[in-house]
Amino acid sequence: LRHNDAKEIDMPQSVKLWLVGEGDLSDFLRKLRVSKHLQDRVYFLGYRHPDELRKITPQAHLGLNLLANKGLSYYYSLANKCFDYIQAGIPAIHMNFPEYRALQREHPAFLLLPALEASALAALIRQLLHHPAQYQTLQAACERAAPLLDWEIEEKKLIAFYEKVLANE
């Protein structure tokens, strides 16, 4: 989110935010947490080993994958966390970028954020909080998609691709 979007977005007190990993906004967000008195609602878990992350992710109610469109590599990206959320059975909110739209058409297991704005994000979070049937529909889609989007399946496709390429040399 842009720095000026970081004002209070009026979430219920029960909503907690866990931030795993570190990024270019980590220092700003830590200062904002203190200035907004959100120490009891926003937690910084830092870098975590993938094995530990596989234990943390299923504890979440909702995954967030927020990216600014800083160029084509961001705009056409497809983050691992997208698949981590699906594997954990956790509905998520991802950016409305082309690869996420394509994946959502095939596996409607998450919502798309139209713009990286606090009000738009808050609206989607509230939507899922207030519409448990929609949340359950997304969760069921995660469960259906998880076996199809497993790395072991994708690994076989990648190996077959490389074998084909190497055979044609």
Image: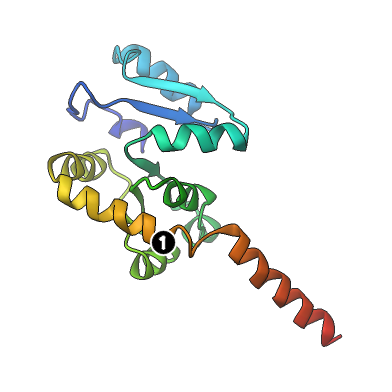
On screen, residue 95 above or below 42? below
- Please indicate whether residue 55 sits to the left or right of residue 145 in the image: right
> x and y percent of residue 50 in the render?
61, 38
**Which of these two is toward me, 144 or 18?**
144
Residue 119, image quadrant = top left
> x and y percent of residue 149 in the render?
50, 62
Quadrant placement of the N terminus = top left
**Which of these two is toward me, 148 or 113?**
148
Q: Secondary structure at mark 1?
A: helix
Residue of label 1: 145
Residue at image coords 51%, 52%: 79
Residue at image coords 48%, 60%: 147
Q: Amino acid at mark 1?
A: Ala
> x and y percent of residue 6 in the render?
30, 29
Quadrant placement of the C terminus = bottom right
> x and y percent of residue 130 in the render?
12, 41
On screen, residue 27 above or below 80? above
- Please indicate whether residue 157 sits to the left or right of residue 64 in the image: right
**Which of these two is toward me, 101 or 114?**
101
- Please indicate whether residue 12 sits to the left or right of residue 88 in the image: left
Number of labels in the image equals: 1
- Please indicate whether residue 152 sits to the left or right of residue 127 in the image: right
Residue at image coords 59%, 28%: 47
